[in-house]
Image (cartoon, rainbow, N blue to C red):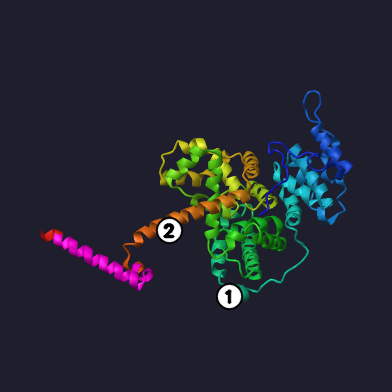
Amino acid sequence: MATNTETTTSSDSYITCTDCNTNELTSSTDEFVTAFSDNDENGEQNDDETCKDILSLETSNDDLFQDIDSETVVDEYSEEEKQKALLIVECLKRNDVRNLRKLGRTKAGFVCDVLRRMVWPKICKVDVIATSPRPDSEEMSKHPFYTQVVLDVNRSLKRFPPSIAENHRLAMQQQLITLIMRVLMKNPSFHYYQGYHDICITFLLILGEEAAFHCVNTVSKSHLSVFMEKTMESTADLLDIIPLIVRQENERLADFLEQSEVGNIFCLSWIITWFSHVLRNYQTVGRLFDLFLVSDKHMSLYLTSSIILFKAEDILKLNCDLATVHHYLTRTVESEESLPFEKLIDEAQSLLEKYPPQEMVEKQIENKKREQQNVQKFSNFWNIFNIRYLLRKTTSIGFISLAVLVVVSATIFQYWRNK
């Protein structure tokens, strides 16, 4: 299991040219970054004309960047985001996936959907030009998961931006069904789970059907593979890592949650949908997908842990009972306005560095074995009262000895009663 070993910068500051391997970036990008990084004597940012147009990178004749225009990236975003957008474009021009991954982990991620449309396929290492045959409606309808997929997609209205016209939304819902079924039919070992469609919607909205298919197919084999197993047992094991991380940072909070018996089910939908099922803010969802795509596959566990730790003070004020604590925790992410996601992302990355996934997985396995041993000991104790167990486990000689012991005991008891 790979552990994220690259050094990341704080999410509270944007990545600079130094962070992104300055020697490999063009002079035009250096000038652009300098224009925003340098402050004058009064502490105000320089308003160099170089910053006015992202096309100054001479990408206007490149088909890959034809969708980028000054209005998309410059007018709608802050100066730091403009700076970062140019760094992303420069990395794309140089096919520098390593630095793209660094940029995805820092503040604002890949900034906007125009850039995500180009970056995500690079991160997933897929060829967006390649095509894969689409199954027809009859083929899809015969698939064992088809009915459930259709039901889930038909209930996914709130996941589409309200600005989308109804006829367009209906067409996209059909594309979503086709997208999911293509992945499932290409990978017969995959088992569809409720929530998978939420992840697929995000890819579809940003990339379009064909590019989304290639990216989702790749991510399903890596980051999402454990969720697509026949049972959710492995997923449940992953969730058990969250309280282990919390305990490392705040033992009092961990004890409180354990005493309340709230378990981990409250965050299941966060993990298996990359938070897309519970977050209403479209930009926040895109930002989190940037993070998860460039990070270790366990990053959603660390982000969940950082959210719980962030809310520790409020949690400890609650009545320590399952209903109260569960209700509060399930509402935590839904009230996303109160969550500083960039700060939480930064904290999640720090937690991952302090407590590497491999160590946490091994610790979870040890805890599970210990619990199973305790259950087995308890079960063995009660089996002495289980006649079927005795008949199955005891040899004929042993059973005769046991029978003699029972008869002798009964005789002594009867003698004692009659005395």
Task: Give the mark nearest the N terminus, 1 or 2.
Answer: 1
Secondary structure that dominates the magenta span = helix
Q: Quadrant of residue 272?
A: bottom right
Disc 1: which residue: 142
**Quadrant containing the C terminus in the rendered view:** bottom left
Q: x and y percent of residue 43 in the render?
A: 77, 26
Q: Quadrant of residue 214?
A: bottom right
Residue range highlighted in magenta: 390-415
Label 2 neighbour load within 10 Å: few <14, some 14-19, many 20+: few
- Amino acid tagged 2: Gln
Q: In front: 386, or 118?
A: 386
The question of residue 403 being in magenta is answered with yes
Figure check: 174 above or below 14: below
Q: Quadrant of residue 109?
A: top right
Left or right: where 131 falls relative to 320: right
Q: Is residue 17 visible?
A: yes
